[in-house]
Amino acid sequence: MTVEIDTRTDRAPGRLVRPGDRDWDAVRGAFNVLVDQRPEAIALPTDAAQVASVVGWARERGLRITAQTTGHNAGPLGSLDGTVIVNTSALTGVRVDERVRQVSVGAATRWREVTPLLAPRGLAGLHGSSPEVGVAGYSLGGGIGWLSRKHGMQTNAVTALEVVTADGRLVRADHEHEPDLFWALRGGGGSYGVVTGIDFEVQPLKELYAGALFFPVERAADVLHTWTGLLASYPEELTTWASIIHFPPLPEVPEPVRGRSFIVVLVAFLGDEADGSDLLRPLRALGPVMDSLAVQSPLGLNRLAMDPEQPLPFRSTTALLDRLTPAAIEEVARVGGAGSALGLVEFRHVGGALHRAPEGAGARATLPGDIAFLSLGVVPDPAAEPVVREQLLALEAALLPERAGDYPNFVMDPADPSAFFDRATWARLRRVKDAYDPDDLFRGNHHVPPSPTPR
Ligand SMILES: Cc1cc2nc3c(=O)[nH]c(=O)nc-3n(C[C@H](O)[C@H](O)[C@H](O)COP(=O)(O)OP(=O)(O)OC[C@H]3O[C@@H](n4cnc5c(N)ncnc54)[C@H](O)[C@@H]3O)c2cc1C
């Protein structure tokens, strides 16, 4: 469907960028540059009232709406025919109330703008591996990071959401107001409206013992065998990720790792150095070639994972796993180890608080599995694609027997979102959609449609 919008006669509310406009390509870009977003138009409202006007404007023209903050998870949207992107990147603002450990942000906010305000106050948010990820999409889809084994998912730390609904109202959704909408947004995300503001709770944390143990990539199987064997004994205060990382030979990559490959054990321990060292002794005994573990401010967690921060072209795969078997480890080391075409093969120890639904949880109450697996390969040109795809498929096949489910925020391709929830949760998500957006105006990246209409 192509909708003709003549911006000279058909005045849209606020700034609207259309195909052919000078900054079209700059504005429509996603974090994964292989995702070629071609919506009908992109609206850039500067406040909630403008968001509401855009919603009304699009609705009158039979257009659908998808909200976007940073474009870190644009891949699942697929074709954007007949759809307007409402880009919330002008809805800025961060406020910290340290007395009650509450943060309020505009929907433009990225984690990098929040963490530096928290650390000096002895606070930390439940952010993930990349400071460039938006608080909005991260929080609406779940949000797992360094403190999740202890404190759960970010979505359940959210205390209120300001959202423009399909009828153009700006509502505040929390446990007392619009409780069904509040529940559905925390897991069902962008299918219910355009979020303009988010309030969330943060944790007290002055310092922690954190850093990375680097081993040559040739030791991948040894390290993964030892790491896997330790997980069941690790307390919820300790989060470790084991990642094979093939660092690109780019000038912005720090010299000691530039162009080299490692298996890295990343560590965040909510405790002191002595206890942390005890817990990590079996891994240190494997003889890391670099060891950056130190007592530090939670600010150090921002870039601990060394994620890419600039848009890049990639293919990825993911799964939640019950365990990593010895046979799977050997295959992972063979496919993802020295000489692999993949850039990252990451295993995060999850579980702990992620297995327990906190009181008042949203639709994404828990995550199954004890390990979150994520792998990606950079595809700089089409010739690189077949081998990256083949290696991602080989990893999927090796890990399939231990698959426990999916973590939607890591799913970066179109998928069946009903598989991300149990049947009762999915049915409730659709009922809330019926109540708030029966005409299916809003498209989430992992979309929740209204209930099927009876024939
Ligand atoms: C490099 C990288 C590192 C990552 N690390 C982690 C991690 O450690 N832990 C983790 O849990 N996840 C992680 N993710 C996944 C990340 O949480 C998702 O990609 C998330 O959806 C990004 O949110 P965003 O707002 O930045 O992206 P966007 O693509 O802008 O948004 C994703 C979706 O969220 C919804 N949405 C966004 N903004 C709004 C809004 N204002 N109103 C309503 N709906 C909205 C929409 O459905 C949208 O399609 C990572 C992703 C990447 C690429």
Image (tube, rainbow, N blue to C red):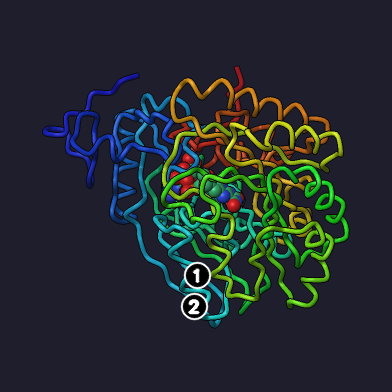
Q: Quadrant of residue 110?
A: bottom left
Residue 96 picture location, percent across and down: 47, 74
The answer to which of 111 and 157 lies nearer the viewer is 111
Does mark 2 have its CB less than 8 Å from ligand 1? no
Dividing the image into 4 quarters, which one contains the N terminus?
top left
The answer to which of 244 and 311 lies nearer the viewer is 244
Q: Which mark is residue 103?
A: 1
Q: Is residue 148 left or right of residue 20?
A: right
The answer to which of 151 and 436 lies nearer the viewer is 151
Label 1 vs 2, first from the N-terminus: 2
Q: Tell whether label 2 touches label 1 (CB within 8 Å).
A: yes
* Residue at (61% x, 21% y) in the render: 454
Residue 418 picture location, percent across and down: 66, 32
Q: CA distance from mark 1 to mark 2?
A: 6 Å
Residue lying at the far left in this picture: please name it: 8
Q: Is residue 50 left or right of residue 394?
A: left
Secondary structure at numbered mark 1: strand
* Residue at (50% x, 68% y) in the render: 115
Identify the residue under disc 2: 97
